[in-house]
Amino acid sequence: MAATTVSNTPKASNDTTQKLSEVFNAKDTSFTFYYFNLHTHGATPRALLAYADANWKQHLPTDWFSADRAEKQQTIYGTLPLLYEHHGETTTLEVAEALNIELYLAEKFNLLGDNVAEAVQIRGAYSNTRALMHRQEDAYFTRKAHQADERQRFIDTFLKQWIHTHEAVLAKNGSNGHYVGTRTSLADIKTAVAIEQLLNELYEFEDGSYADLINPTATPNLWKVRENVLSKDSYRQWRESKTFQEYKAVTQGFFDKERHEL
């Protein structure tokens, strides 16, 4: 489902923490996601909201890079993304930072398994995939003269290990396209998003893609995770939406510009 975009900047309520905590357990809430029209650090939070078929809207910064940086200074840490969960007319809980947002939504939408042991496994796989994507980003933004070497180092040191270990974890769980148990978790969604980003959605290296390393034949278990997540109607609708495609084009243009200026 494609979320609409609102112009009003959301604000957190000045309620007690006890009152704000009630928002988490409420069912009739809505969300506003505050981030740029890029995928990057907004990709997984948006994927979680879409997968859960949540009632959500988006707010895009309008003068984040202005001379006085007034909009930036109004945020809690001067960073995006931010998530706001609204309950009723007066109560709004603010969640800052991408990692915190992703874990909050996973708990909210029951994507952390059925017990503590499952949650530990899910968060472990999620964290490992999240670290992989940060290393990929580092390799991409290396100065152009060193980019080929850094890309190869990323493949040999990080990506191949991630593929090998995650294929094994998924096989141990029965090769059913889930890291834990028989239903989708935060780890599954994070991996599905990572695969889309690795397969030239965000990071287009001039010397080729990762399609020879990640595909239905070479990585059947990882590919099944991706297919399982894509099979959810609300998530697929978001992926196919005009907004998603516009963000993809903006993201690719932004990354190409940044890389070519290095």
Image (cartoon, rainbow, N blue to C red):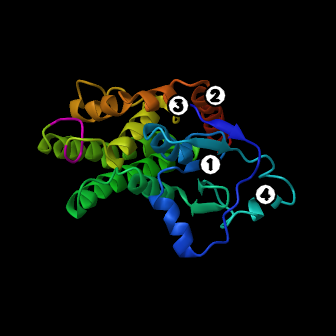
To which residue does mark 1 refer?
Answer: 32
Q: CA distance from mark 2 to mark 4?
A: 23 Å
**Which kind of residue does numbered mark 2 sit on?**
Glu
Numbered badge on residue 1:
3
Marks 2, 1: nearer the viewer? 1
Q: Counting residues from the N terminus, which is met first, the one under dot 2 or under dot 3?
A: 3
Q: Residues within 10 Å of mark 4 (few under 14, many from 20)?
A: some
In terms of secondary structure, where does tag 4 sit?
Answer: helix
- Residue at 58% over, 49% down: 31
Q: Position of residue 27 (x, y in %)?
A: 47, 51
Residue 216 vertical placement versus 45 (above, below): above
Read off the residue under disc 4.
Answer: 71
Whether residue 177 appears in magenta in the rendering, the answer is yes
Distance from Cα at disc 2 to Cα at disc 3: 15 Å
Which amino acid is tagged 4? Glu
Q: Residues within 10 Å of mark 2 (few under 14, many from 20)?
A: few
Q: Nearer the viewer, mark 2 or mark 3?
A: 3
Disc 3 residue type?
Met
